[in-house]
Image (cartoon, rainbow, N blue to C red):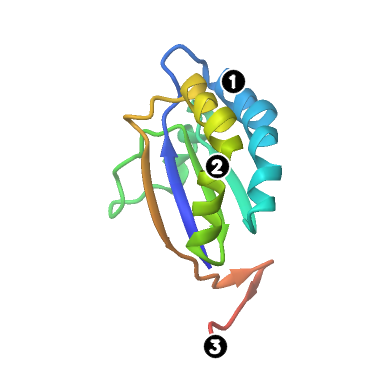
Amino acid sequence: MLVWTVCAYRKATMSEDEFHRYMSDKHAPLVRDALARHGITRYTMTHFTAETRAKLDQVIDTQFINVAGYDMITQIRFPDVQCFVDFRNDPFYKEKVMPDHDIFTDPEKVQISVGWVEDHIVDGKVVSLD
């Protein structure tokens, strides 16, 4: 399984709450049906706020000390990269999704990657990779 990971920063004009609400209430509903239609198997958002960053004091140690500054990670899983290519080539993506990105984020600050996923614990149970 492959995963496209996006590390995004909210527009400077948006508050944390406005960003979260926009992503969850507007952007996700806009894209999720099209993603599923093209074979995407999972679409998740992880939101980071001042409140959640404050919890880092409880889990940070001397080995890992660099705190990420982005506001959200989005991950989209697919069995074949062509699923995501087809989504990006869909006229709906070009007409609706691309312009929507400019509402909530600065594309020049976004960082992306594609990799594969290995689940080692699922639902509290250790799983074998065999």
What residue is shown at x 60% (from left), y 29% (from top)? 23
Residue, far bottom = 130
Residue 46 relative to residue 34: left or right? left
Circle 1: is it few (<14), some (14-19), or many (20+) Cα within 10 Å? Answer: few
Residue 123 x, y percent position in the rendering: 69, 66
Residue 19 relative to residue 113: left or right? right
Which is more N-terminal, label 1 or label 2? 1
CB under 8 Å between discs 3 and 1: no
Q: Which residue is mark 3?
A: 130
**Residue 82 versus residue 43: which sits nearer the camera?**
82
Residue 106 x, y percent position in the rendering: 39, 25
What residue is shown at x 64% (from left), y 24% (from top)? 21
Q: Amino acid at mark 3?
A: Asp
Instruction: Please state which of the two labelled residues, at mark 3 or mark 1, is closer to the viewer.
Output: 3
What residue is shown at x 63% (from left), y 54% (from top)? 38
Specify the label residue 17 is tagged with.
1
Circle 3 sits in a helix, a strand or a loop, which is it? loop
CB under 8 Å between discs 3 and 2: no
Quarter of the C terminus within the rendering? bottom right
Q: Is residue 78 above or below residue 22?
A: below
Q: CA distance from mark 3 to mark 2?
A: 29 Å
Residue 88 x, y percent position in the rendering: 51, 45
Residue 34 x, y percent position in the rendering: 66, 44
Q: Which residue is mark 2?
A: 46
**Residue 32 versus residue 13: which sits nearer the camera?**
32
What residue is shown at x 66% (from left), y 26% (from top)? 26
Specify the label residue 129 is tagged with.
none
Which is more N-terminal, label 2 or label 3? 2
Q: Amino acid at mark 1?
A: Asp
Q: CA distance from mark 3 to mark 1?
A: 42 Å
